[in-house]
Amino acid sequence: MRHAFIGALVALVAVLVVSSAAVAQTAQSQAKQARSPWVYYPLDTVAGDGGPAPKRDLSGTWAGPGSTDAIPRGAAADKPSLTPLGQRVMSERKPIGRFGPAGTNDPTARYCDPLGFPLNFIYQNRAMSVAAMPNRVVFLLQFGGFWREVWTDGRPLPTKVGGDDRDSLDPTYMGYSVGRWEDDYNFVIDTTGLDERTWLLRDGTPHSVMAHVQERFTRVDHNTMKVSMTIDDPKMFAKPFSLGTYFYRWIPNQKINEWLCVPSETLKYLQEQGDPAGSYPNAQPQRLGGGGR
Amino acid sequence: MNTKVPALVALIAGLGMGSPLFAHHGDAAYSATPQVMKDCVVTEFSWMNPHSLIKFDFKTEDGKVQHWTMEIGSPPSMALLGWGRTTLKAGDVITAYVYQAKSGVMVGRTNKVILADGTVLADRDDSTPSR
């Protein structure tokens, strides 16, 4: 009798285990069926500590310092010492942070002009992919949908960009970049030839075409990358200074959502919202929103 | 362990979407206190960069209809807060919490929107990046 009872109990437990497993499998399969491979599901991206940094490798999909408070903020750019020319150009700039969309002359805010380098690695550095090719490293930026090539074949930086000589290269929004591995974990990039229409910093700080920007990408560990930037531009600044330090975190299966500046949409925004709201450059800054709390 | 889950979700969500902490522009052009308008009828919802726009009609106590436009953040940022391209459509009835422009025109920054089913959608909260 006792054996019969134990046998029945074992059978019951077995049925329960099997049925609960079946229920779990059904739930899992339903969850899988409901998902689209084209949609990014944040919960899928738990990556743990990631382990040690791979050697000489920045490849991956990275989330930038604006993405969340969880990413260290690093350090902002130092305040530059402007030359008289730098002061004159700066005095003509009306940054959006103070003048708002209606009063700014920021070419990105008003016309969707590209932020250009290095501002697109200082401001709005959201998601970014890095891919290594045999002779270059390519950066793919979420904000604006831009890419940037850094040559690693040993060529030197150009010495003539934007000049009147026939052999002078054209200035570009991303500049001309060369990179080298200083050691197994530090990739150093030098850039020059930057289009002078772009602003160096959001406050309107200018730069010249032959400014020299140096970046140091440090692969701290598998999931962490630190970027430190400096600029030397004697035409605009009395001395070189730091453009800040920025941290990125590697997200293995991050889907980089499209984030373009569409001129027709920007025009609609300005005409229907930004311009009617007006410009109050002397008002106290404030941050609104937060109605969910 | 459970207490860590919300923080983890917030972290991962922020990482995945790549949304910035920095506002596209300052808010100095808007009043600091939101006004509440009930029974607003949505006339247009533009899910776009740099900021999405909600247009709606609001009937005042004396029966006049005001045509309002208010902005929220960009689509990738707003998706973190539960918004989507199909969140609103013309004809929907909402309650709007709006910081009106100091210029006096009927445009504003959004504090929050309450949908007809009671869903509350914010323009920003402190755990998730704004714009």
Image: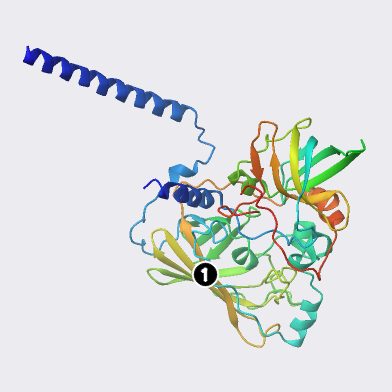
Task: State which chain disc 1 sits on.
Answer: A
Q: Residues within 10 Å of mark 1 (few under 14, many from 20)?
A: some
Q: Residue at x 52, y 41 (%)?
A: A40
Instruction: Decide if residue B54 is on the left or right side of residue A45.
Output: right
Instruction: Decide if residue A18 is on the left or right side of residue A205.
Output: left
- Please tell me whether mark 1 sits on a helix, a strand or a loop: loop
Residue B96 percent across, percent down from the top left: 75, 42
Q: Nearer the viewer, residue B84 or B6?
A: B6
Task: Kindly identify the amino acid type of the residue bearing the numbered disc 1.
Answer: Gly
Instruction: Decide if residue A151 is on the left or right side of residue A49.
Output: right
Residue A111 percent across, percent down from the top left: 79, 57
> On the image, numbered disc 1 is attached to which residue?
A74
Residue A198 percent across, percent down from the top left: 72, 68
Q: Nearer the viewer, residue B81 or A265?
A: B81
Q: Is residue A133 visible?
A: no
Q: Is residue B16 visible?
A: yes
In this view, B28 is above or below B72:
below
Q: Residue at x 65, y 40 (%)?
A: B120
